[in-house]
Image (cartoon, rainbow, N blue to C red):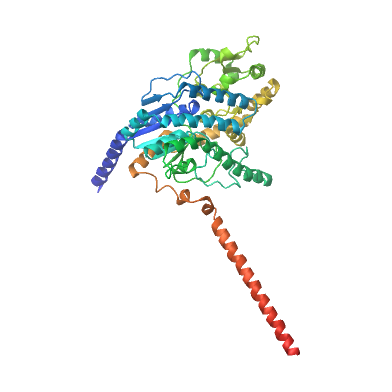
Amino acid sequence: MVGQRVLLLAGFFLSEFLLSEAAKILIGSSLGGSHHLLLDRVSEILQDHGYNVTMLRYGAEFLIPGMKNNEKPYQVISCLPPEDYEKEINQTFNYFMTEALHGREALNNFVKLMEQLGIRCSDLLRRDDIMDSLKNENFDLVFVDAFDFCSLLVAEKLGKPFVSILPTLFGSVDNGLPSPVSYVPAIGSLLTDHMDFWGRVKNFLMFFNFFISQWRIQSSFDNAIKEHFPEGSRPVLSHLLKKAELWFVNSDFALEFARPLLPNTVYVGGLMARPVKPVPQEFENFIAKFGDSGFVLVALGSIVNSYQSQEVLMEMNSAFAHLSQGVIWMCKASKWPKDVKLAANVKIVDWLPQNDLLAHPRIRLFVTHGGMNSVMEAIQHGVPMVGIPILGDQPENIVRVEAKKLGVSIQLKQIKAETLALKMKEVIEDKRYKSAAVAASIIRHSHPLTPAQRLVGWVDHILQTGGAAHLKPHALQQPWYEQYLLDVILFLLMVTLGTLWLCGKLLGIMGRWLCGASKLKKA
């Protein structure tokens, strides 16, 4: 019996190894920025575990200007759309960012950007050289970013099963997950899971607002769908999202509020975490100047770093001058106002090893824009935060940071030197923030499997079982009125009203009969 078990186990692991070694995975990446960085990490992990990974990169890195393309361990297929397309996208994106940094993140501006991405996607789908090459590869699985609608359409065009990764919190897209509005905050509500009556009213209204917004955003790809899919078999993006075999979510319960999950939903927050390396000597020399006071790390993301206004830079510089700690600040020297003297305790750099600095024993605070990758790295190393959210999911992320007592927030338009300095000193001096950050780090580290192991293990499972039909409830195929039992409620209401009407009629007839009988007796 023991020998048989050993042979069975050996056969299982051998078949798993051969499967993972032979499996071919296509990863679509057309958004750039932090989205590309996450998919790059996913590609590296899958390639390192024996998969044959190919990344389709379409479009310039308009979210990280000047991003370098280093040599990759996986295969890359790169193609650029026509120059006028990229020019139009860059102009639209620049306008969107300028407006957002002034507190005007309007849905209309975002829809215009998505329309440009839809035009660019249509160009990719009509590139027969690229699409034929992908078809000939006969991939086993496609891996997509939930926000990259073009990759969803590529997977559908190839007729291949796909898994999706959500780079942000739940609720950013509708993937069919149960979302009780009584305690699951809708995107844009800026609520926690502890809602009073008026909070639930707001959340209920924001829930419907979300679906209207999603319809407007997804309709920006309608022309691409009409052009490249025959009538009668045209996909609907909202249906495609629910078609994913698996959902990987770039978050963790150390940050997210507890909520219902489906069996095909897996948290993999922390994928970006890499082994910690010693920080470069120039940073060590700077940190050493401040002894036990330690240092503050400031990184507001590549986008804000490129679009930041000089007025905000001046206010932040003045705020940092009030600290006894050193400040390492990712800020482009070319953006620095020439007539402003840098504070004596501040070091500005174009690039910094964020993960390694967050792991440094003398770090006291992380000032962040609240991007999910940055927040997860801070939680990974137990570092409290001051959040300056700008756009997208950042405000929602920072709401959770505050709810979990991992830090505080301040709005970009409210940044004044005195206010920011007080916020930073509060988090540094009140040890409760550090304690909460350490507790979140323990939650994050105490999973039985690492994020990379969960990612690879579930991809293995999907490939071995031929999909995830056994993990997806029938609810994903039901229309919304069936899911919420509106048809049942309507039927029961009609039966109840019909019964009451019939009873009323019978009582009326009986009443008239009794009255008639009484009159006959008197006569």
Please state, as top left, top right, bottom left or bottom right, where the C terminus lies in the image.
bottom right
Tell me where residue 94 sits by quadrant.
Answer: top right
Residue shown at 53%/50% (left/top)?
480
Task: Provide residue 221's location: percent of width, then percent of height.
Answer: 49, 35
| Residue 162 at least partly seen | yes
Q: Give coordinates of residue 176: x percent, y percent.
A: 50, 45
- 313 or 142, which lies in front? 142
**Horizontal and vertical percent for residue 203?**
63, 43
Q: Is residue 321 above or below residue 46?
A: above
Q: Quadrant of residue 76?
A: top left
- Residue 269 lies, with reference to residue 417, above or below; the image says below
Number of marks in picture: 0
Q: Is residue 358 left or right of residue 152?
A: right
In front here: 299 or 390? 390
Image coords of residue 191 (percent x, y): 63, 39
Report the front residue among 42 and 255: 42
Q: Is residue 366 visible?
A: no
Q: Is residue 249 above or below residue 318?
A: below
The residue at 63%/27% (across/down) is: 427
